[in-house]
Image (cartoon, rainbow, N blue to C red):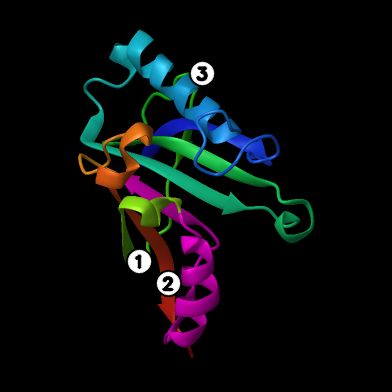
Amino acid sequence: SLLGMNFYGDPFKNNNFWDEENEIGHLWNRFNNYLKNNPKDFSRRVKSDVSLEIFIPSDDYATHGVFEVFVGVIVDKLDIIPINCVAKKLPKSTYAVFTLKGEKINSDWQKEIFSEWLPQSDYELNYNFNIQFYDNRFKGMDQLAKSEIDIYLPIIKKV
């Protein structure tokens, strides 16, 4: 189970992908400030030091570039969802995991995965979303060269 905050729209309308001033950067700032100012909402429930960013394309993503972005943490239960937060429960799936290191994080990895790896593999998307997984290997926006993140893609064997 995941607990966090979300944004719906085009987060890159005014700024680039890895820019703290785009809507995703603002979303992370809002979530991190909430965590800092409301520790009791999360302190006993967070399962690990992992943060997640999930991209969920909308039906009109191809034409309008809008999608949902969720940022949050893994929690042990969803008995209470703070009014400022949203919860996600991801469907069970097998995941392909891609580790991005250093400058690769700021590259066009989406094209490599979705236009090159996926069509050439024996798999297809099981669900239309992907997860960016941040743990202690991610050193921050100002230290991307020293950082690593994992991308999780829900897949299923092609029939």
What is the secondary structure assignment of the residue under circle 1? strand
Calculate the distance from the C-alpha at mark 3 to the C-alpha at mark 2: 33 Å
Q: Which residues are magenta?
A: 107-133
Say whether residue 41 is visible. Answer: yes
Q: Which residue, given by chain and number where applicable, does mark 3 sit on?
A: 83
Asked if residue 151 is positioned above or below residue 78 in the image, the reply reads below
Q: Which residue, given by chain and number where applicable, does mark 1 sit on?
A: 95
Tell me if label 1 and label 2 are in contact, CB under 8 Å.
yes
- What is the number of the mark on residue 155? 2
Which badge, 1 or 3, is on the more N-terminal residue? 3
Figure quadrant of residue 153: bottom left
Badge 1 amino acid:
Tyr
What is the secondary structure assignment of the residue under circle 3? loop
> Which numbered disc, 3 or 2, marks the residue closer to the eye?
2
Residue 141 relative to residue 26: left or right? left
Badge 3 amino acid:
Ile
Q: Position of residue 4 (x, y in %)?
A: 44, 31
Q: Residue at left 42%, top 46%?
A: 89
Badge 2 amino acid:
Ile
Q: Position of residue 108 (x, y in %)?
A: 51, 60
Question: Which one is in front, 83 or 15?
Answer: 15
